[in-house]
Image: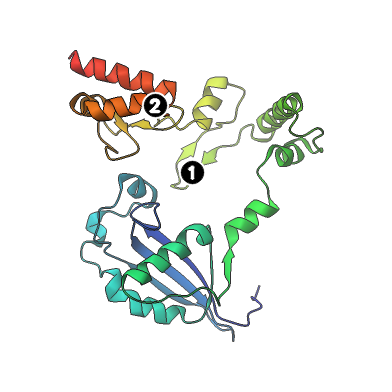
Amino acid sequence: MDFNLDRDLIFFDLEATGLSVVRDRIIQIAMVKYPKKGGEPQELSMLINPGIPISEEAMEVHGITPKDVANKPTFQQVAEEIYNFIGNADLAGYNSNRFDIPMLMEEFDRVGIEFNIDNRRSIDVQRIFYKMEPRNLKAAVRFYCNKEMENAHDALADVYATIDVFKGQLEKYRGVDYEDDDGNITPTPVTNDMQVVHDFTNDLRYVDATQKMKYDVDGSIVFSFGKYNGKPVGETLSKDKQYFNWILNKEFSSQVKQIVKRLVREYENQ
């Protein structure tokens, strides 16, 4: 299929040191430009030295390490090349309106280049997906049960609809393996075994339901947020009682408070 263009169109994606479009930095950029006059698309792809640490969470997602970017150019060194490649093209991506475009604008601003998107179109393919294929209970009933849901948002009706959807999922995915983004295979995870389904539908790295703590590679419980992100909970809070009391007195879940108290007690009783 050829795109109907009155202006160049660039599909692009960024990998970054983290998820904050303001604080974090680009470490990889890839662009594919479709010229409005047709012809072969042009590519631009490069690794970038961010000048700041890459978060552990980000490395788990994209696999790019500090060593990979240590000898790469900074954004300031490649900003003009990227800017010229984009020109006056429209921009497209996946979740690009909320992440890639704002982050790219921040990077250009840091090096003194005004990157204005007021007069260019932005196409977010993820938004098309979410709008055209909604992921709500009504859509799930239609997809798995081949019927329309009645009395949506009545609590009891929602419960019975959820039951129907779960039964439909057990039928549809019987004998079907799951492959994640890294190619890892989970054999038949949607099966009529509640422990198997529990494991599949929960992120077992996290200790609590609100995901404030998780297991590290050694099996220790560490923080997954805040200034002590990645640090062992029991040891950290034993040494920083002010932070410990802050957690106990703020709007953290009762589960989080119970766990941190237990971990501090266990650490101090070693």
Residue 151 spot, x, y in % from top left: 80, 32
Q: Which residue is mark 2?
A: 207
State left or right for residue 216 relative to residue 39: left
Q: Earlier in the sequence, mark 2 or mark 1?
A: 1
Residue 220 visible in the picture: no
Residue 145 spot, x, y in % from top left: 77, 35
Say which residue appears at 47% left-offset and 58% top-offset: 99
Categorize mark 1 by other alpha carbons within 10 Å: few (<14), some (14-19), many (20+).
Answer: few
Say which residue appears at 28% left-offset and 62% top-offset: 50
Identify the image quadrant of residue 227.
top left
Instruction: Tell which of 191 and 114 is nearer to you.
Output: 114
Instruction: Tell which of 192 and 132 is nearer to you.
Output: 132
Question: Height in image: 10 above or below 204?
Answer: below
Say which residue appears at 42% left-offset and 21% top-offset: 255
Residue 103 spot, x, y in % from top left: 41, 62
Secondary structure found at label 1? loop
Whether label 2 touches label 1, CB < 8 Å: no
State left or right for residue 182 relative to residue 41: left
State left or right for residue 49 relative to residue 8: left
Q: Which mark is residue 39?
A: none
Q: Which residue is mark 1?
A: 180
> From the viewer's perspective, is the residue at label 2 or at label 1 nearer?
2
Residue 65 visible in the picture: yes
Q: Quadrant of the C terminus?
A: top left
Question: Height in image: 250 above or below 7?
Answer: above
Q: Look at label 2 and name its amino acid.
A: Val
Say which residue appears at 25% left-offset and 15% top-offset: 265
Q: Look at label 1 and name its amino acid.
A: Asp
